[in-house]
Image (cartoon, grey):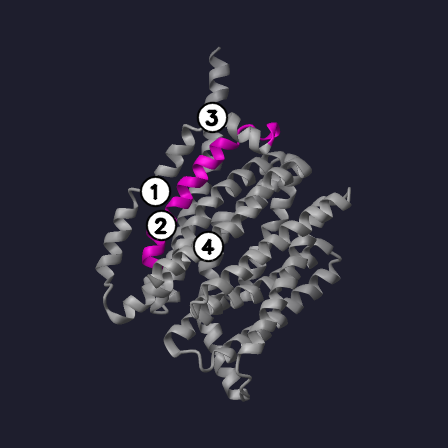
Amino acid sequence: MSLIKDSSIYLIGELSAKCVPFLLLPYLSRKLGVEGFGELSYYQTFLPLFVIFIGLSQDGAVARYFYVYGKRSLNLVVKTGYAYTLSIGGLGLLFCWLMQSEIMFYLVLSAIFQVFLSVQLSIRQCQKQAIPYTFIQVSSTITNAALTILMLEFYQTDLVEKRILAILISNVFVALLSYLIYRKRVNNKKFYFLQYKTAFFYIMSFGFPMIFHHGSFFIKGQLDRIFIFHRFSEAELGLYAMGAQIAFILSVFILAINKALVPYLFEKLKQGSVKLKDLHRWSLLSLLIVPIPSLVTLIVPEQWLLFFLGKHFIGVKYYIIVFLLSTSLTIPYLFLVNYLFYHGKTKEISFCSVLSTMIYLGALGILPVLYKITKRVEENEYATH
């Protein structure tokens, strides 16, 4: 019953937290327009990139430490990770200040506090504190949405920058609040330099290979927006980004279930009641679910989508279908990768991620060839007529 109860709380919290940004989409699409939404998507692409290097997967490192070594010196890992984040993030802020890039300064600062927040959420999840976890998550989302509406209504210019600033303020507020609550409950044990050194090497050994893992996801899921922004119009990027944003709802649902089940999966793996062959079987069976969301979207009239988003987003249905298909493929992936996470096989995870990225980039590489071939066929057709 505890599993069902916690899973329900995590799922409700995750969906509630992500439901607010989804409900905010019609407001943003009308307030920013297709071009503004495309520009916002371009700048927001840099946020996960900064988190990869500034955070170094500290939330995962904290979770694994808790499950493998216990909570006795968990605060040592948390404090060491925060010190690393402040150091690397500080260098990033200095660089943005020297380059006089105000928006990038906001994004780096937001990434720092997003890392802090993700670590706090990871601690609550490890300790199976489903309600505090959900409260922090929902508070962050509601604060984010409220500040966004407040700023976009108060200001009439530079609305994209104001949206990014709203995200920053929300991250700072909720991250500091959750950390203060954590500080009151944790035992402030004194640690020595050698212990901090050991914790630092633990974070590096866990997090450095994960740069390639998360970096490959960034390349496959975010990097294309940078190319689209510079190669095509902001309006075209707006359509592309909106399709990805709507399909992200499915990702939220999948990851919410995954977050709720991971602590129990790790316990079952430790007890030996769940074997690798079980995960292999579940992964194969989940392939039957993969095409269902895209098929459902295929029969939905596009007019319904335009009523929700605005008439300027015509053509977005195609992107939603494609992104739903790719998102659904994370289901069999999660069954297998959680097994590797449990055993701390971050190098193997990174290898698989890098390999899939190479395949992805190879697929992209064929596009210029196809472009030239189709242009040549078109020229030949005109010549024959």
Q: Where is residue 303 in the image (x, y as percent from the top left)?
A: 52, 25
In the foreground, 373 or 253: 253
Q: Earlier in the sequence, mark 2 or mark 3?
A: 3
The amino acid type found where label 1 is placed reads Val
Mark 3 touches mark 4? (CB < 8 Å) = no
Crowding around mark 1 (Cα neighbors within 10 Å: few <14, some 14 to 19, many 20+) is some
Q: Which residue position is annotated with label 4? A: 216
Span highlighted in magenta in the image: 310-337
Q: Earlier in the sequence, mark 3 or mark 4?
A: 4
Is 49 left, or right, of 293 in this rendering?
A: right
Q: Which of marks 2 and 1 is nearer the N terminus?
A: 1
Depth-wise, is mark 3 or mark 4 nearer the camera?
3
Depth-wise, is mark 1 or mark 3 nearer the camera?
3
Q: Which residue position is annotated with label 3? A: 301
Q: Residue 331 carries which label?
A: 2
Mark 2 touches mark 1? (CB < 8 Å) = yes
CA gap, disc 4 to disc 2? 18 Å
Q: Tell me the element at label 2.
A: helix
As drawn, 383 above or below 8: above
Q: Position of residue 309 (x, y in %)?
A: 58, 33
Is residue 306 found inside the magenta-colored segment of the image? no
Which residue corresponds to the image point at 43% horizontal and 53% vertical from the top-left?
11
The amino acid type found where label 3 is placed reads Pro
Depth-wise, is mark 4 or mark 2 nearer the camera?
2
Which residue corresponds to the image point at 50% horizontal and 68% vertical from the top-left?
58
CA gap, disc 1 to disc 3? 21 Å
In the foreground, 373 or 99: 99
Q: Residue 290 carries which label?
A: 1
